Amino acid sequence: MGLEYTHEAGQTPISEEEMSGLKIKSIILQRELDEFELLNIIKAKAWLKKQKLTPETALSESFMKKLHKKMFGDVWKWAGVFRRSEKNIGVGWVTIGRELKVLCDDALFWVENETFSQTEIALRFKHRLVSIHCFPNGNGRHSRIMADVLMENVFGQEAFSWRAAGMVSADEERKTYIAALRAADQGDFAPLLKFVGA
């Protein structure tokens, strides 16, 4: 009997092929999967604290793949590898590399020219990164940590609290967060800035 993977509103379903990439075959419950992923993410955050990153390093495909692998590599065989399937969100999988390069170039321009506030640069980057949806799963968590990387490693500021540590369950915090993302989809970043306390 395999794991019955369930997803909340705003999360991406995992295909049968991607599910076969689960490294820990003893996992049969969603909460077990969530726990293993969280433990892996905690290890990734500890690794991140030791990294010295320039804007060019942080805003690179190789770093983002490496971060995703650090976050999920203990759990999924495909961690750190761009998806090769279409999803309910995101660009066509064959254009991921190109779209990510455009985003990284844009973000470097924003940083160098102070186009937006530091907080808004991090949130705009996070929003576009998750809309590209580079990986089979974990894109929301990866994009939030990437926003934190920009805040801490690039700008020397405090990381975002994201108000709810895991934001996995469909509670009021998650609903507020998803609504803020939907507003950002329409070009209105005020709710997302408010959500992070900016």
Image (cartoon, rainbow, N blue to C red):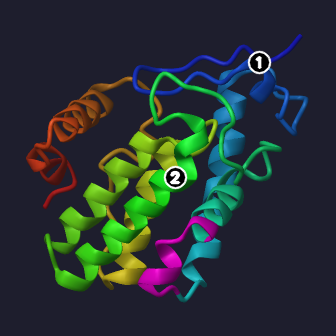
Residue linked to disc 1: 16
Residue 71 horizontal/vertical position (percent): 65, 56
The residue at which mark 2 appears reads as 142
Q: Is residue 163 magenta?
A: no
Please report whichever mark, 2 or 1, sits nearer to the chain's N-terminal start.
1
In the foreground, 127 or 47: 127
Q: Residue furthest top?
A: 1
Q: Quadrant of residue 28?
A: top right
Total numbered circles: 2
Q: Is residue 48 visible?
A: yes
Please state which of the two labelled residues, at mark 2 or mark 1, is closer to the viewer: 1
Q: Secondary structure at mark 1?
A: helix
Q: Residue at x 69, y 61 (%)?
A: 70
- Majority secondary structure of magenta residues: helix
Give the x, y percent position of residue 62.
63, 69
Q: Residue at x 27, y 79 (%)?
A: 111
Q: Is residue 138 visible?
A: no
Q: Residue at the location (48% across, 56% down)?
A: 100
- Residue located at (46% from left, 34% from top): 90
The region drawn magenta spans 53-62
Amino acid tagged 1: Glu
Q: Is residue 117 left or right of residue 170?
A: left
Residue density around tag 2, few if under 14, some if 14–19, many if 20 or more, within 10 Å: many
Q: Amino acid at mark 2?
A: His
Q: Position of residue 182 (x, y in %)?
A: 23, 32
Q: Is residue 76 left or right of residue 31?
A: right
Q: Residue 77 got which mark?
A: none
Q: Quadrant of the C terminus?
A: bottom left
